[in-house]
Image (tube, rainbow, N blue to C red):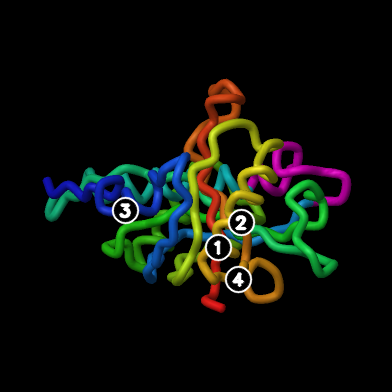
Amino acid sequence: MKILDLRKQYKHLYQPSAKKIETVQVPNLQFTMVDGAIEKGQTPGTSPGFAEAIQALYGISYTLKFTLKKRKTNAIDYPVMALEGLLWLTEGDVFDINIKDNWSYTLMIIQPDVISQELFEEAREQVRKKKGNSESLSKLKLAHFEEGLCVQVMHIGPYATEPATIERMKEFMKENGLRDNVGPNGKHHEIYLSDPRKAKPDKMKTVLRHPVVKV
């Protein structure tokens, strides 16, 4: 059986330092993705649509993993990677991490290039038969995304303390001749390495990533 060590292959993208902010060139990668918006008065932690999207993403990701692992020829095993979120404004001009009920989002999980559109559709049908249909499952897509030049850091702690880490990122950008591209031309990116249902808030790990341009 062939093993794809995605965690090792993409370690520089998914295990950055918490102490040192850095620039990184994010290549064109394949993801399962689903789009949505946070309902008024809700947050990602309380939004029904957000929860449904997560369930659909993990459902198809594990189905794809075990489909490839169990096939009789050319079996492949690989880890299901972390949930990621691209976040941007539904309305307004300035993205504010503290105001969450005007966010649109793309939730996604990276997939190895061996996953084809045909395999993806077969897996979607398996999930549909096993767990029933949902709007998020129907909206799932397999697509590539190239983020390009970014600034990133590992945030340690609860989501509520992210603004302080983002301020550190902005200071780094200023000192290094970079402009934050979050807004009309880019999206705030979070990679959720901890399960908030299990991890202690002060131990939670979230990669924060912002696309940037050189000034």
Q: Residue 76, percent across and down?
A: 20, 50
Q: Which residue sits at x=52%, y=51%?
A: 84
Q: Is residue 71 left or right of residue 209?
A: left
**Crowd rating for badge 3 (residues with CA inside 10 Å; few <14, some 14–19, many 20+):** few
- Tell me the quarter of the image containing the C terminus: bottom right
Q: Which residue sits at x=36%, y=51%?
A: 64
Q: Which mark is residue 175?
A: 1
- 184 or 32: which is nearer to us? 184
Q: Magenta segment, principal secondary structure?
A: loop
Q: Which mark is residue 179?
A: 4
Can residue 128 be seen by looking at this rendering?
A: no
Residue type pointed to by label 2 = Glu
Q: Label 1 vs label 4: CA separation?
A: 10 Å
> Magenta segment, which residues?
39-52
Residue type pointed to by label 3 = Tyr
In this view, which residue lies farthest toward the right?
Answer: 41
**Crowd rating for badge 2 (residues with CA inside 10 Å; few <14, some 14–19, many 20+):** few
Residue located beneath label 3 in the image: 10
Looking at the rendered image, the disc whose residue lies closer to the viewer, 1 or 3, is 1
Q: Label 2 vs label 1: CA separation?
A: 6 Å
**Crowd rating for badge 1 (residues with CA inside 10 Å; few <14, some 14–19, many 20+):** few
Q: Is residue 175 left or right of residue 124?
A: right
Can residue 143 be seen by looking at this rendering?
A: yes
Secondary structure at badge 4 equals strand
Residue type pointed to by label 1 = Glu
**Crowd rating for badge 4 (residues with CA inside 10 Å; few <14, some 14–19, many 20+):** some
Residue located beneath label 2 in the image: 171
Looking at the rendered image, the disc whose residue lies closer to the viewer, 4 or 3, is 4
Q: Which residue sits at x=44%, y=55%?
A: 22
Q: Residue 27, percent across and down?
A: 37, 69
First in sequence: mark 4 vs mark 3? 3
Magenta stretch: residue 44 in it?
yes
